[in-house]
Image (tube, helix red, strand yellow):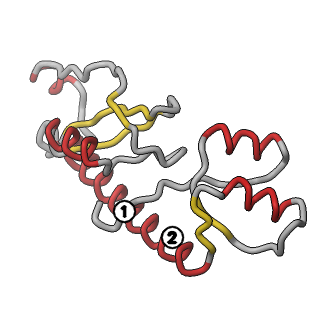
Amino acid sequence: MIHYRLRCHAEHEFEAWFQNSSAFEKQAESGLLSCPACGSSAVSRALMAPAIQGTRRDAAAVPAEDPNAKPGTEVQTEQKQVATTALALKQELLHLRRKIEQNFDNVGDRFADEARKIHYGDTDPRGIYGDTTAEEREALADEGIEVGTLPWLRDDA
């Protein structure tokens, strides 16, 4: 497993784990990665400090919580926990996406206009979802129109 710090085109930074560097490249080229803040699939690796492993002597100097634990097992356990949590989060996001698709109107790239119509009473209130740019989201916020952004995961991701 390899840990990367990622950045979207809107400069949001987040972290992710990949099986190897080619797995990252493949997912990025396929558009399978998305920013958790804005949903953008324009994601690249950000600069990060390298992880430097100490010597065996250094590892032996730091006592493990379990005196019988082999060196590195805490890290492996933590990586498995992160992967398990990430998978559970992905499943929850896919479940949320299905609920939204079943219960809300997809207004596509007309989202900002429709949100304004609902906010100002020009149309009946209803749940909507769709696409906006960062500028449109900022303009809506400036007008006092609350909207949320979710990472829109594909079912096959």
Q: Residue furthest right?
A: 121
Where does the C terminus fall, quadrant-wise?
bottom left
| Residue 113 at x, y percent in the picture | 73, 55
Give me the residue at 22% from left, 40% from top: 24
> Which amino acid does the dot numbered 2 rest on?
Leu
SS of the residue under disc 2: helix
| Residue 9 at x, y percent in the picture | 46, 32
| CA neighbours of label 1 inside 10 A, class few (<14), some (14 to 19), many (20+) | some
- Left or right: 24 with respect to 22? right
Q: 17 or 146, which is in the foreground?
A: 146
Where does the N terminus fall, quadrant-wise?
top left
Q: 67 or 114, which is in the foreground?
A: 114
Numbered tag placed on residue 96 in the rendering: 2
- Left or right: 135 with respect to 153? right
* Residue marked by disc 1: 154
Give me the residue at 35% from left, 55% from top: 86
Front label number (1 vs 2)? 1
SS of the residue under disc 1: loop
Q: Residue furthest bottom?
A: 102
9 over 82 or under it: above or below: above
Give me the residue at 89% from left, 60% from top: 120
Q: Earlier in the sequence, mark 1 or mark 2?
A: 2
80 over 12 or under it: above or below: below
| Residue 59 at x, y percent in the picture | 17, 26
Numbered tag placed on residue 23 in the rendering: none
| CA neighbours of label 2 inside 10 A, class few (<14), some (14 to 19), many (20+) | some
Quarter residue 61 falls in: top left
Give the spatial CA distance, label 1 vs label 2: 12 Å
| Residue 85 at x, y percent in the picture | 36, 57
